[in-house]
Amino acid sequence: MLVTCPHCETQFTPTARSCPACGDYQPPLASTADYETNQAELEISGGTSVLCVHQRLVDKGFSEIVADDIITSARRNVRRANRRTGGYRILAGAGLLAGAGLLALVSRGAIVVFSILAIGLALFVAGMIQYVSGANLD
Ligand SMILES: [Zn+2]
């Protein structure tokens, strides 16, 4: 989302603290909230502690309450993304389990069937945990 400088009409992303053309205009903090939510999301999913992100937001001038809001939506987005990955794992695991079942019907290769079964089960269980908790298991 771009903001427009009222003095020179330059458009810039609200990551800049002031207008890059005339330096005369500072975008309102509220216009940077979306950007900060995305940043916080990247930081949290990258392993940065919530306290660090919170402190960074407060340092930038956000109130405690707004900083908390930004972090809450960032964490919600991170959980949603992790759930999606968990969902794929469940599907992949279920597919492998079904494949192992089919293979067991037509083949006597017990080790192969058992390996596929084990991988499928591991994926399935990991997917379920990730889906339920929204945690990042990678
Ligand atoms: Zn300007």
Image (cartoon, helix red, strand yellow):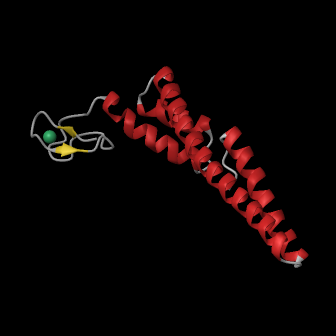
- Left of 68 or right of it: where is 49? right
Q: Position of residue 134 (x, y in %)?
A: 65, 41
The answer to whether residue 73 is above or below residue 134 is: above
| Count of marks placed on residues | 0
The answer to whether residue 43 is above or below residue 4 is: below
Q: Quadrant of the N terminus?
A: top left
Q: Position of residue 92 (x, y in %)?
A: 67, 59
- Left of 19 or right of it: where is 36? right
Q: Position of residue 111 (x, y in %)?
A: 89, 76
Which of the two residues, 14 or 97, is positioned nearer the viewer here? 97
The answer to whether residue 49 is above or below residue 92 is: above
Q: Quadrant of the C terminus?
A: bottom right
Which of the two residues, 5 or 21, is positioned nearer the viewer here? 5
The answer to whether residue 4 is above or below residue 114 is: above
Q: Residue at x 67, y 43 (%)?
A: 131
Q: Residue at x 10, y 35 (%)?
A: 7
Residue sticking out furthest to the left: 8
Residue sticking out furthest to the front: 106
Q: Residue at x 69, y 52 (%)?
A: 90
Q: Quadrant of ligand 1?
A: top left
Q: Quadrant of residue 23?
A: top left
Which of the two residues, 77 or 131, is positioned nearer the viewer here? 131
Q: Position of residue 10 (x, y in %)?
A: 14, 44
- Left of 20 or right of it: where is 53? right
Q: Quadrant of residue 11?
A: top left
Q: Residue at x 69, y 46 (%)?
A: 130
